[in-house]
Structure formats: structure tokens, C-alpha cells
Amino acid sequence: MKKEITIPALKKKLANLDQKELTQIICSLYKNCDYAEQTINLKLLDKSYGERLLQQYQGRMYKIFFPNDIVRSGFSLSCAKGIVTDFNKVCQDTELITELKLCFAEYGMEFTNMYGDIDERFYNAVCNAFHDVIEVVAKDRELFDKWNSRLNSIVHDSDGIGWGFHDYLVEKYYGIPWVEEKD
């Protein structure tokens, strides 16, 4: 649906409201919109809220990759990707967003090893998530050190998987400036 008001026009209208009216609007959004509630909580609460919220999103993703009865419920790549998209809408913390993408790549790897060869679209999605994680850790040594064993496990566990999947992961991983060369 097309927005009824542009952002500049919204800013102008909001600037003309008093504190009480702004508070009412924000409280109404907080009460009626999960995204607004999560966004406001992320801004106003400490880092532990972001970590708890990340765990919720990871749990939702886990249920998509590994439902209780996969025969009945199936697997939906678009739903799994949607969880990352939804988290991106509310969270501005690069580390938390990247951690969720790393989780996506891990679950994708585990899913493949559990159910066998998947399709190219699936592997592209896992590679995209892995690529995004690599982009962040290549610029942040602390995050690299924090997640290196998980990244290495994904690469190691992908050995033998086709579609150029393993080769791509190896290339990206060993392209990180501080990864030691393979023997």
C-alpha cells in the first residue's frame, strides 16, 4: 500500500505536535505494533533486551528449519529469510543482525546435512547469509575471534556439497584478512 504521507511531511506534522500528543502516538504504536514495541525497547532498554530478542528470532528460525514434523509442516525458505528481514526492520545493532545471519547459515548447513542435497536457491540464500557475516568479521577482529569457530565449522561441514557451495564458502572464509592459510 502506498504511504499516505511522505517522511518530510510527517516530520513537519510531528514538529507541530506538543509533547502530550507525541507521547500518545508513540504509546499507541508501542501497544498495537510488535515492530514498534521491539524498536522502542531496543532504543530504551539495555543490551540484554537485544540479546533476548535475538534469541526469540533464532528460536523462530529454528522452528522453520527444524519443525517437530517436517513432513506435515514442510520447510519454507522464504519464511526463514523473512525472519532475518523482520529482525532488520527493528534492530540497528550490526552485531545482533550479523549473529542472526550466522545462525541462518548454521541452520542451513545443518539442514543440508540432515536432509541431503537441496536446490540452488537454498544454497544461494545460505551463501548470502554467510557472505554478509564474512563482510562484517573481515572489518571487526573481535567479532571474527568471537565467531571464528562457528564460521570454520560451517566451511568444514559443507565439504562434499555440490552446486559450488563448499568452494564458495572456502573462498569467502579464507579471504578474511586474519584467517591463516590452509596447510
Image (tube, helix red, strand yellow):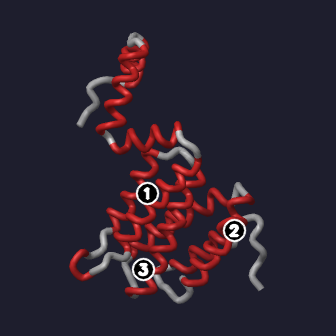
Instruction: Quickly name the residue at label 3.
Output: 111
Q: For mark 3, does the 10 Å Cα neighbourhood hold few (<14), some (14 to 19), or many (20 or more) residues? A: some
Q: Nearer the viewer, mark 3 or mark 2?
A: 3
Q: CA distance from mark 3 to mark 1?
A: 17 Å
Amino acid at dot 3: Phe
Image location of residue 19, percent across then percent down: 43, 15
Q: Nearer the viewer, mark 2 or mark 1?
A: 1
Quarter holding the N terminus is top left
Instruction: Quickly name the residue at label 2.
Output: 175
Amino acid at dot 2: Gly
Instruction: Quickly name the residue at label 1.
Output: 84
SS assignment at label 2: loop
Asked where in the image residue 114 lies, by quadrant, the reply is bottom left
> Considering only vertical position in the picture, is 169 above or below 160?
above
Quarter holding the C terminus is bottom right
Q: CA distance from mark 2 to mark 1?
A: 25 Å
> Considering only vertical position in the picture, is 170 above or below 97?
below
Q: Nearer the viewer, residue 178 or 111?
A: 111
Residue at the location (43% across, 82% down)?
Answer: 112
